[in-house]
Amino acid sequence: MPPSSERRGLGATGLEIGPIGFGGWAAGGSEWGHGWSGQSDAESAAALERALEAGIDWIDTAAVYGFGRSETVIGRVLAGRRERPLLFTKCGPVREENGGIRFTLDPASLRRDLEGSLVRLGVPFVDLLQIHRPEPPDGIDQAWEALVALRDEGLARHIGVSNFDVAQIERLERIAPVETVQPQYSLLHRGAEDALLPWARRARAGVIVYSPMASGLLAGSMTRERLASLPPSDWRTTDARFSAPVMERAFELLPRLRAVAERHGVQPGAVAVAWTLRNPAVTGAIVGFRRPEHLEPVLPATTLELTPGDVAELERVSRG
């Protein structure tokens, strides 16, 4: 099923995007300490090719994903294309000598991140540059000033933030408007509803949410046994998003997701993504397609209209 031809305005940026974007985290590979096990460049490239064929028109990645590997794979796929999707990337975390990650918001480091991203992606500018995380918190003001300068130089068309709370965003607003925000948002992680999404509606900021299927937990294929069999290098083996309490909530929610999916003739993952897209504050959802075959089950989310009964059924468990 092709995705919807609907285009949504990304806040006040003037950009228009489809409801679903291609997430570049997995394209960072499996060998950088925060990757997905068993992910090859060929699989990542094939997934992106399929996404572009299906009409997905924006990509969200980051300089830190695979320490540049994700952007390199994306750049190779896009090389030579007459028309390219919108490119969104993030800056901030950097590689340490021991292979770990250090969080910095030093302006010079942010500039190096972006300059490296442009080379890897093969473009003169990105459509959206985001601060990856507000870490360290006392550096966000100078970091935002740095992004404003990079935008003014024409290296980024628009600027935004990821994983910031409203108080931090309001600090930045004293310097320059925050054009977009990127929070985690799914039926399992609804914290953005408390303050961030209402703020975004008031401020007319664009919102692109990540992990709408809770990193695969709501796609229906994850089991305790599968999680236990993942190699230690896979980020899911140690992350709190795959802790026992979260897994229990997911397993409680999945039968409801499957019931709603069956009524609409789609897969559970499509229902999970459609649920995030129905929020009026949300512009688009980032989906991390790891392989070409992962697209077809999710694409119906772009046209799926959940009924009030569907939503009530899902949220009774979700809120609990």
Image: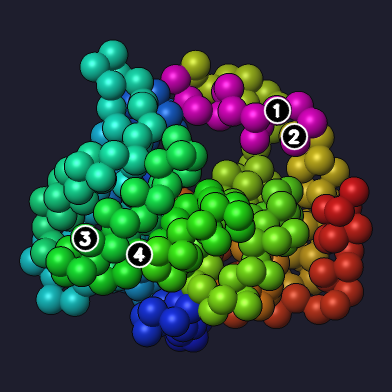
Q: Is residue 285 left or right of 194 when viewed as pictured?
A: left
Q: Residue at x 59, y 28 (%)?
A: 239
In primary-sequence order, the first of circles 4 and 2 is: 4
How far from the left and from the top, in percent, is residue 105? Answer: 34, 40
Helix, strand or loop status at disc 4: strand
The amino acid type of the residue labelled 4 equals Ile
For label 2, the residue is 247
Query: Pointer 3: residues within 10 angstroms few (<14), some, or many (20+)?
Result: many
Helix, strand or loop status at disc 1: loop
Above/below status of 199 relative to 202: above
In primary-sequence order, the first of circles 4 and 3 is: 3
The amino acid type of the residue labelled 2 equals Met
Helix, strand or loop status at disc 3: helix
Q: Which residue is drawn at 46% across and 39% down?
A: 138
How far from the left and from the top, in percent, is residue 114? Answer: 21, 51
Q: Is residue 101 left or right of 258 when viewed as pictured?
A: left
Asked whether disc 1 touches disc 2, contact meaning CB atoms under 8 Å apart, the reply is yes
**C-alpha distance separating marks 1 and 2:** 6 Å
In primary-sequence order, the first of circles 1 and 4 is: 4
Q: Which residue is drawn at 58% across and 22% down?
A: 238
Q: Can residue 308 be seen in this view?
A: yes
Determine which quarter of the picture holds residue 53: bottom left
Q: Which marked residue is nearer to the observer: mark 4 or mark 2?
A: 4
What type of secondary structure mainly makes up the magenta span?
helix
**Mark sitting on residue 243:** 1
How far from the left and from the top, in percent, is residue 211? Answer: 56, 51
**Mark sitting on residue 203:** none
Near-viewer residue (125 or 179)? 179
Residue segment shown in magenta: 233-246
Q: Is residue 143 magenta?
A: no
Q: Which marked residue is nearer to the observer: mark 3 or mark 2?
A: 3
Query: Pointer 4: residues within 10 angstroms few (<14), some, or many (20+)?
Result: many
